[in-house]
Image (cartoon, helix red, strand yellow):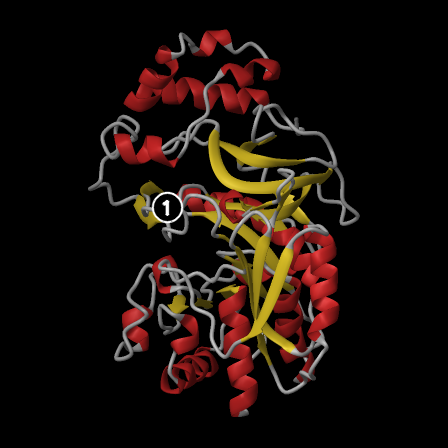
Amino acid sequence: MFNQDFDDFIQELEYAYENVPFYAKHLKKSAITPEDIADEADIGKIPTTQKRDYRKNFPVGTFARGYNLKDTSLVRSQSSGTSGERLITYEVGMLLSSRAMDCVEVNPAIEAAFSRSPRKICRYAPPNCSDVECANPNSQMSDRMLSDGTLVLPVYHDLLTTPESMVRRALDEICDYQPDLYYVDSTHFAFLLRQAKALGITIPYAPIICTYSVLTPLNRAQIRGYFDAIGDDDFCIAELVSSSEMGWVALECQSGNLHLNTDAFYMELLNSDTLAPVAVGQTGELCISSIDNGAVPHLRYLTGDEFEYVSAECDCGYHTPVVRMQGRMSDTVVLKDQTRLSAAQICRRIGAPTWLDMYQLSQETDERFMLLLMVNSSFQSGVEQVLLDTLSELLGGDITLQSQIVPYISTERSGKFHVVKNLSQPQ
């Protein structure tokens, strides 16, 4: 569906079929061999894969011949557990680096910061998303320094319970480290910057990559507002979509558009019901195939992330397709008429009111919703009604939407913060 190299896909298919026990069995079960895939139209014959396939067959069934858990060239990754049990996977470190370098080419400011050698990156994200223990209040910088020059900043599992002493330590470490790049969860980083402002602490500017969860208009405005206020003119914030299994999947260009990393992967956007490719203007689940003969190949891997296919071209001139992130399929709101609204659609409608610090919309039944609001000193009684009216219009006329101003909203078990939760669906 995109302008991609079919030969790269076939080479990966043959490699996985010949070298990975799971894929040999997976394809034979459907009576398919690589010879049956003559052109791109035939790719749909190959059955898709999901996380459960890798959990069930890990490690022996998922490793390509010649690789094992003791291989020093491999990097171990694990998912945060957002959608359930955490998934452990491995890949050749050099391949993950190559995929990331392909991805950053779309954004020169991010590419320049990421390509520095040596480079200094500060990570601020849920503890489950990090490779070290960063929730321990007694940890030191040296305990949280990764081999690639990334400093993982300290943070509690439940973000809003992070004590001031740990917040100050994170801000002091940023000032000491002087990073080239921030690699952050946007909700977490917006919280940290609000604390920095309240404490009168100024941290140095560097380009910002926001990943782990959807970059909301509210968080984007809060992050930009902090650095604008301290006079940084060369501001760059970019949304990144990445996964523990695959690495860097999509990055926002300097024109503000999200580009799929089709240089490093073979990608499809598939209708969640029919698994047919979607057209421009439609939304589908991202399905990824690796194309670099790695340690743990992935073929037609359903990510659980939804994107709108916006365009094959972009004003920035970069050649990869433009999409709009909609969010995790598990965060979708389902209305009585079965209309589905993504987390991103809801966040765009809420926007970025200056009186609002954080929010969370929960769907309790198919017609009852609760909106929790954490407000700041700019809040005035009644201003929330405009927000409730516009959100009610999006959700439909015959629903009940209640709001509550609260001092605290909890994060998930994974440490991530969900701005939209569907409590009416089985978890």
Q: Is residue 281 above or below residue 11?
A: below
Q: In this view, does 390 lie above or below 136?
A: above
| 21 and 145: which is toward the camera | 21
Task: Judge from the rendering whether residue 120 lies leftward or rightward of residue 360; answer left or right.
Answer: left
Q: Where is residue 200 in the image (x, y as percent from the top left)?
A: 55, 92
Residue 107 in view, yes or no: no
Q: In this view, does 266 lie above or below 394?
A: above
Q: In this view, does 112 lie above or below 284?
A: below
Q: Residue at x 45, y 20 (%)?
A: 47
| 238 and 72: which is toward the camera | 238
Local packing at callout 1 (Cα closer than 10 Å; few below 14, some 14-19, many 20+) is some
Q: Position of residue 90 (x, y in %)?
A: 32, 42
Name the residue carrying label 1. Answer: 93
Residue type, label 1: Gly
Residue 239 in view, yes or no: yes
Q: Which residue lies furthest to the bottom in this view?
A: 200
Q: Which residue lies furthest to the right in this view?
A: 315
| 15 and 47: which is toward the camera | 47
